[in-house]
Image (cartoon, rainbow, N blue to C red):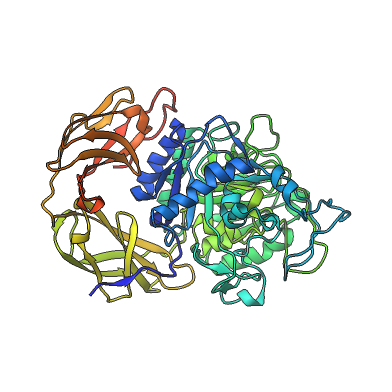
Amino acid sequence: MLCARATPAAAGGGPENVFLVVNPKSLDSLTIANYYIHLRQIPAGNVFYLPWDPKADGASIEDFRSKLLNPIIEAIHSRRLSAQIDYVIYSSDFPWEVLLESDFKKFTNPLPVSDESGKGDLQQPMPGRPTLSKIITPVGSLNGLTYLWQSVLKGEADYLDLQSNRYTRLPDARQKDMPTLGFRSAWQFGQHGELVGSQGQSYLLSVVLGVTCGRGNTVDEILQYLKRSAAADGTHPRGTIYFVKNGDVRSEARHELFPEAVKELEELGVSAQIIKGTLPMNRKDVQGAVMGTSDFDWKASGSTILPGAICEHLTSRGGIMSKDADQTPLSEFLRNGAAGASGTVTEPYVIKQKDGGFLRGQPKFPLPEIQVHYARGCSLAEAFYQSVYAPYQLLIVGDPLCRPWANIPKVKVSGLKPNYIVKGTLSLSPAATTPSGRGIDHFELFVNGSRACLCKPRGTLTLDTALLPDGYHELRVVAVESGLIQSQGRAVLPVISDNHGRKIEVKVASKGVIRPDNPLIIEVNSPGSIGVSVLQNSRIVGRLAGEQGQIKIQAADLGSGPVRLQTVGLGQGGPSTHVMALPIDVSVETSDKNNPQSPAPNP
């Protein structure tokens, strides 16, 4: 008996839920992606290579739709991943700002302009929304517009609304049973943030791993904070989250929300303090920081940011990454060890609420509750997007999967061991425990990164391996905890399928660490194949006509760092008749064009 088809309401986020977008024209983008894939075990089929001019750090909304967003959504659909992708993550060297002037011109009822004094036109509210006074500026962020992808692709003005994000957890009685919630792209949210069956809004969590242009970070800095963030998962850190209070309007905008956040954190057993000043001074335990200042020097503070921390400083130009910008950029937090930081990519202006409603603080910046959502076990991306009303201008950079307080299940699988040769029907009996003892909601089986089926606890995951090509496959059994956050844990089980008698032999002349100026030579023999392809994740990097021969790949084209290649013998009857060789794992040395201090891959 086969297990149930995969239509779960799992949240919490994991590598199987990520769609990683990489710029193959950029060595930095390739290198950062290589390390992130390695650190986070991103499935090969969840990586999308999308070319973009690395020197173009801005884009028009037309180019963003046609050259980035549309191809990404189409690739997710064509790979049949729509039911499982919750995160669209950009590596580096994509445009951090998107110019929206043409959208403003075409809106028949354009959104209004008013100033912080409340003078000027008011927005005509969406149904059920309060009337708000605000300034709208025609610039958006790469990840903010990706998050709001449905409205952006349709060219609808509501992606600019100050409460466009219904995933934000509001102080609304209709959300009292879900004050913090995991995320699924399949969920639809009503106008008050409640889950609805249809006719609601759905989103895609989106974060940029690193910005290497202008005022961004070096490749080495990015790799270091990504490595620290991955190691922070499930550690339940004992540091302190600081809410910094001063007379600056950037700070005053959120003061009234500090006490509530501190109270909620303390109830969770997480240390939190409201302090006066510009930033924490001489504190060696900064597990998070909510600040309000235009300029700061973190090193001069004498404070230490601990792994997994979210730090941000509500200021107008913190997300503007061009060299000529003023104010301290978000990259300063990341340089000093934060897991994630954010800033707006244009002047957002002081926005004041004119009428009633639930809008609190600055709607284009995270509310202080970001730290509460995070401490309840959410991923970094889930914490950010639950705490910002209008994310279209907010650039979020860091590790979206970081989850220091997650209740991560430990998974065991009976019926299979790694690297077993399998035939016919395979039955797996999964079990898992959680640190809190909360229990498991269900298990999911992924085959080569694609979700195949699920079962409830004490059930069986069943797979007909005869439907797979012969050769190497990666099975993942994912346990999803019970509750609103639904954190995930997994067991990864490589297997060799042998049902159709197909064979492939692969020999590699260069193993281990290779120089970027050297070729990687692969000798292949695949009897009966009409050709052979070598893939780096989802892209073909080498080909061979016929069943036998030599494939030469220039190492520099792969990017630096840990690289996994998959060699596939192509059968005459389509994918089911292919044969998959064991993966080739190499590490490409750092090029002189890249940062010489990039860390070596983890063993």
Instruction: Name the quarter where the N terminus is drawn.
Output: bottom left
Residue 379 position within the rendered picture, expressed as x and y whole percent measured from the top left: 49, 58
Above or below, comparing residue 175 to residue 19 in the picture: below
Q: Quadrant of residue 587?
A: top left
Of the pair 479 and 2, the residue shown nearer to us: 2
**Is residue 302 at all visible to an observer of this figure?**
no
Above or below, comparing residue 265 to residue 43 in the picture: below
**Is residue 141 at all visible to an observer of this figure?**
yes
Residue extending furthest right?
A: 119
Residue under the point 66% across and 66% down: 260
Residue under the point 52% across and 66% down: 269
Side of 195 relative to 275 (left or right): left
Above or below, comparing residue 596 to residue 151 in the picture: above
Residue 373 position within the rendered picture, expressed as x and y whole percent measured from the top left: 55, 63
Residue 243 position within the rendered picture, expressed as x and y whole percent measured from the top left: 65, 55
Above or below, comparing residue 198 to residue 447 in the picture: below
Residue 131 position within the rendered picture, expressed as x and y whole percent measured from the top left: 79, 64
Side of 523 relative to 559 (left or right): left
Residue under the point 19% across and 66% down: 426
Of the pair 416 and 379, the residue shown nearer to us: 416
Residue under the point 45% across and 31% down: 25
Side of 244 relative to 229 (left or right): right
Of the pair 476 and 491, the residue shown nearer to us: 476
Of the pair 28 and 201, the residue shown nearer to us: 201
